[in-house]
Image (cartoon, rainbow, N blue to C red):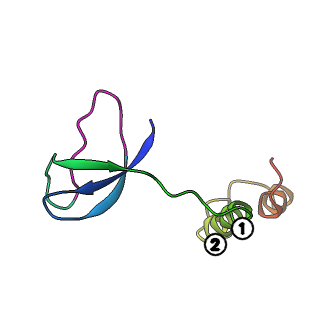
Amino acid sequence: MPMFDYHCKACQAGFELLVRSSTVPTCPHCGSTDLEKCVSRIAPAGKIEAIRMSNRRLAAAQGHFNHYSPSEQARLLKGKSV
């Protein structure tokens, strides 16, 4: 499912949604279907790796890597695949 950015014309909210092709997207704030699809911003060059590593550190702090061995956890946090 692709992720799209939308702008609600009814309540002026901006948001992202994962949308299937058969689904009609609705605003999570007001429920309106009067939405405008927006162009998504991309991450600046050189920042993608930093963002990914930041997300991995946060996941580790929340205990999402607890089912991995200590050596596998170290590899994940260094950015190497298991």
* Residue 25 horizontal/vertical position (percent): 25, 42
Is residue 26 positioned above or below 45 on the image?
above
Amino acid type shown at disc 1: Ala
* Residue position for label 1: 50
- Give the x, y percent position of residue 2: 45, 39
Camera-side residue: 38 or 25? 38
Kind of element beneath mark 1: helix
Which image quadrant for residue 53? bottom right
Q: Residues within 10 Å of mark 2 (few under 14, many from 20)?
A: few
Q: Distance between the residues labelled 2 and 1?
A: 17 Å
What residue sits right under mark 2 in the picture?
61
Residue 60 part of the magenta segment:
no
The disc label shown at residue 10, or none: none
Instruction: Please report whichever mark, 2 or 1, sits nearer to the chain's N-terminal start.
Output: 1
Is 61 on the left or on the right of 34, as rendered?
Answer: right
Q: What residue type is labelled 2?
A: Ala
Residue stretch rendered in magenta on the structure: 18-28
Closest to the observer, 44 or 16? 44
Residue 12 image-quadrant placement: bottom left
| Mark 2 in CB contact with mark 1 (< 8 angstroms) | no
Q: Please, is residue 77 above or below residue 19 in the view?
A: below
User: Which residue is at a point 82% across and 55% down the rendered structure image?
Assistant: 72
Answer left or right for 51 relative to 29: right
Say which of marks 2 and 1 sits in front.
Answer: 1
Q: In this view, does 3 lie to the left or right of 9?
A: right
Q: In which quarter of the view is residue 68 placed? A: bottom right
The overriding secondary structure of the stretch rendered in magenta is loop
State which quarter of the image contains the N terminus: top left
Q: Above or below — where is 8 with respect to 54?
A: above
Q: Is 63 or 24 nearer to us in this picture?
A: 24
At horizontal 28% and vertical 57% (from top left) the residue drawn is 7
